[in-house]
Amino acid sequence: MDEIVSIKKGSDIKLDIESLAFGGMGVAHWKDIVTFVKNAIPGQTVTARITKKRSSYLEARSLEVLSESPHILDVKCEHFVDCGGCTFQNLNYVHQLSSKEMQVKDIFRRIGGVQAVHCEPIIGCDEIFHYRNKMEFTYSNQEYIPEVEKDRAPSNFVLGLHAQGRWDQILDINTCHIQAPIANEILKS
């Protein structure tokens, strides 16, 4: 692990995203060191910035996609980049299911010590949007301003969800595609 000593927090590196980790980060290897990459999906090659350096792994966030994944989809939600509610909306649903199955098997192997894991295939949902019947929206006077709107002043009254990775600022939500359509009508009123 001498290589981990040579990398510094804040360094930019090129990574090939191999799989998804439990919790939603992309998994890559930098000089045989496991690197968890925020905002990256399997099949992408990205430039990533190191955000955490531990003795046995690194964490990073994707800065630029150099080569796109064959599993990518156009996102339906205008808030996808800033909201943490639906992490994989840009990843083909079939690939999401196979990634989750691999995560279950990995947990049994790595944590449980069970090498011969038999796992039934994950049964996918018929409807991948509008399935949630409970959401917790927050009123706030601390608006999170998305990067594409940075030149405007924050509103002192917003209703929405916590911005990704933030507990102190709220992203004003117009429509949430994972909640039932009637809930969006209630949100708008």
Image: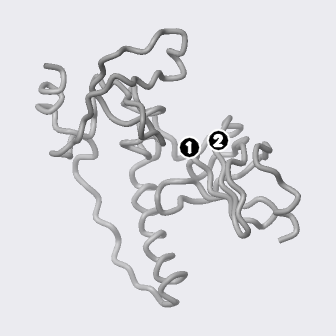
Q: Is residue 29 above or below residue 83?
A: below
Placement of the C terminus among the 4 image quadrants: top left
Q: Residue at x 43, y 45 (%)?
A: 87
Residue 29 located left or right of residue 89: right
Q: Nearer the viewer, residue 149 or 28?
A: 149
Q: Position of residue 170 (x, y in %)?
A: 37, 30
Quarter of the image where one finds residue 134: top left
| Count of numbered tags | 2
Q: Secondary structure at mark 1?
A: loop
Q: CA distance from mark 1 to mark 2?
A: 6 Å
Residue 179 located left or right of residue 11: left
Dot 1: few (<14), some (14–19), or many (≥20) neighbours within 10 Å? some
Give the residue number, with chain letter if any, for mark 1.
Answer: 39
Q: Contact (CB < 8 A) between labels 1 and 2?
A: yes
Give the residue number, with chain letter if any, for mark 2.
Answer: 62
Q: Nearer the viewer, residue 180 or 61?
A: 61
Placement of the N terminus among the 4 image quadrants: bottom right
What kind of residue is marked 1?
Answer: Asn
